Amino acid sequence: MNTGMSRRTFLKASSAAGLGIGLRGVSLGAEAGKGAPNAVKLGWYIGITSYTFNRFTFVESVEKTAALGLHHIEAFEWQRLSKARPKVKIDGSMPAADRKELKKRLDDAGVTFCNIYCRNHRNEADARRRFEFAKEMGVTTLVAEPSPNSFDLIEKLCDEYRINMAVHNHPQPSHYWHPDRVLAVCKGRAKRIGVCCDTGHWVRSGIQPVDALKMVQGRIFTFHLKDIKTFGKKGSPCVPYGTGKGDIAGIMHEVHRQGLKDMVFGIEYEPYRPTNFDAAAKCVAYFDKVAAEILAKA
């Protein structure tokens, strides 16, 4: 079976000790492991938000990302590091030895740690701790929903550490549910303040994703890309790309129209099931199919 992993990567993954990366629990379906080569030709990178595998550890999420043939992952701060180190979280409190080991494991798996989803900071020292951790780990974008009055500090730290802040939207009535509210905190700010487009939450809030993308054009940094079963219904479940009301193809065409490159689309599939791996594989296959169609028309 072709899983999209080299023999070297497979052996490293299956024999890894320390943090405990292995291939147990990964269902290698027929569509898994192929990655999204057509998307790469467009300058796009489809990856995984580790919340898709939130019942697993971060290193297990890295393993599953590699098994899908993908090379980018977004962490969330309160995820457990590994089965061997369950009390260690993916944040600035991580001990130096664990950081070094994790960087090696990511490198061995061929996975880039691109984003971290963060809780709100309590003060400047707490915010600096997040930025310093992100810089050390090679993370380029923090994803969060900061309070509107915190952006003077955030802008200063983004410039100092050369790390982006992507403002995320949860569904209505959360503060940033509407693109207007995200744009309000971006207005007049440096270009390191932008948007993490959670397309599924827009759908749940009754907002067409393509319309939202046009509103936030020029500030888009990254995506939590979801397809959603029902339009305008809070709590409506995720479904594989192309089978719901999330207009994944329309989103991709709009991103192409805007000319966006070096863009990470994070698959976020929320039902808390071991079968999320197989659902993610279907999402990758659909994404690359639409990318091929866009290439053919370009």
Image: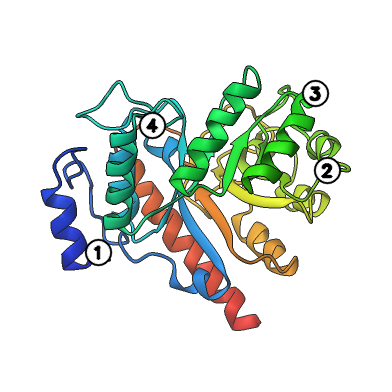
SS under mark 3? helix
Local crowd at mark 2 within 10 Å, few (<14), some, or many (≥20)? few
Q: Do the residues labelled 4 and 3 touch (CB within 8 Å)?
A: no
| Residue sitting farthest toward the right | 188
Q: Which amino acid does label 4 sit on?
A: Asn
Q: Name the residue under label 3.
A: 149
- Work out whether mark 2 precedes mark 4 in sequence or the reverse, and give the earlier one: 4
Q: What residue type is labelled 1?
A: Met
Q: Mark 2 points at which residue?
A: 189
Q: Do the residues labelled 1 and 4 touch (CB within 8 Å)?
A: no
Q: Name the residue under label 4.
A: 54
111 vs 290, nearest the viewer: 111
Residue 143: name its quadrant: top right
Q: What residue type is labelled 2?
A: Arg
Q: Name the residue under label 1.
A: 5
- Work out whether mark 4 precedes mark 3 in sequence or the reverse, and give the earlier one: 4
- Work out whether mark 1 precedes mark 2 in sequence or the reverse, and give the earlier one: 1
278 vs 69, nearest the viewer: 69
Image coordinates of residue 94 in percent, x first then y, are: 37, 29
Q: Give the CA distance from mark 1 to mark 4.
A: 23 Å
Q: Give the CA distance from mark 1 to mark 3.
A: 46 Å
Q: Which residue is drawn at 68% across and 37% down?
A: 157
Local crowd at mark 4 within 10 Å, few (<14), some, or many (≥20)? many
Front disc: 2 or 4: 2
Q: How are the residues colored?
A: rainbow
SS under mark 4? loop
